[in-house]
Image (cartoon, grey):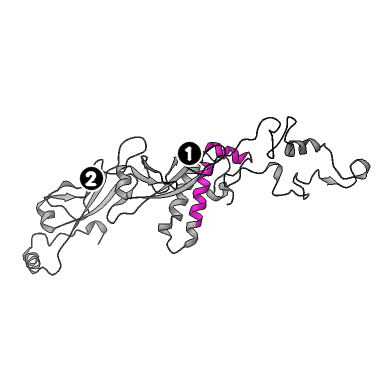
Amino acid sequence: MADPYSTLNVARNADEKAIKSAYRKLAKELHPDRNTDNPQAADRFAAVTQAYDLLSDKDKRAQYDRGEIDENGQPKMPFGFGGAGGGGNPFGGARGFRPGAGPGGAGGFEGSDFSSIFDDLFSGGGGGGGPFGGARRGGARPQPKGADVTYRLPVSFEDAAALRPQRVTLANGKTIELKLPAGVETGTQRRLPNQGESGPAGPGDAIVTIEVQPHRFFTREGDDVRLDLPVRLDEAVLGAKVKVPTVDGPVMVTIPRGATSGKTLRLGGKGFHREGSGRGDQLVTLLVDLPAGDAELEQLVESWTGDRDRNPRAGLGV
């Protein structure tokens, strides 16, 4: 994976808010449900999620910035082992091996006594050791925790709005109940401590990325929920009490007498839970639904002359 800062397109000194904002933007843009015709989007979505997982964890971010772990969250080998520096040796090449520098013309290292370094790395005793046996000088090398395990959790629109707990089955077969946070949206993550893979210093974590599923007639607008509600002509003209679906279940709503298409009714507290406190509303837009080919209705309108001189489009300048 590339540098996590580059993956999220944020500066190295970006604060938590900027990192979270960048992740949410990219997660929405690259979400697989929005890119069914672009298989590469799923790979980028996974990379963005992994980058956010590292940078949103204060300890891991600090370790990465200090060069102690790589972009995958894995400990780096000491002194650059596994990738030699410019001089071709594991210590970077600037003060490298020089033929003939040692006693009697034997090879040696320039500028410093590297025998002590080798003692630290490879010795198993004598008060100083390394990752190959014994303790290092200055303390034992920290043991790594197990790897984190990531999950994608689809959550229904209604469950996300009402914050209904979700059942999650982990890779180890354990089933837990996950509480959804206020303000939940696609890309929101929940960390489950010690539910990842085993490691020398204990298990890693499980990281659950929530995906709020689209709904067939509800849409989200910030913390509010929108709904287009068809009504009959008589219900609009004469007024009526009708049953209206909400994320918490159906409720009875009064359609005012003389309602027109486009009129919006507000149902307080029937939206998404806000971060902090409170809930958004449900906004119900009325759509007068006229039957096609109704001879009786056509006859009624033909004989109706009370409003023929009014121009409802006058406000549009036509």
Q: Earlier in the sequence, mark 2 or mark 1?
A: 1
In this view, which residue lies farthest toward the right? 104
Q: Which residue is mark 1?
A: 194
Q: Amino acid at mark 2?
A: Arg
Q: Residues within 10 Å of mark 2 (few under 14, many from 20)?
A: some
* Pick the front one: 314 or 191: 191
The answer to whether the residues at label 2 and label 1 have Cβ atoms under 8 Å apart is: no
Q: What main secondary structure does the magenta stretch of the protein show?
A: helix
* Highlighted magenta segment, given as a residue range: 43-68
Q: Name the secondary structure under disc 2.
A: strand
Residue 266 — which label? 2
In the image, is 190 to the left or to the right of 47? Answer: left
- The answer to whether residue 63 is magenta is yes
Q: Name the secondary structure under disc 1.
A: loop
- The answer to whether residue 312 is magenta is no
Position of residue 314 measured from the top left corner of the image (x, y, whole percent): 22, 58
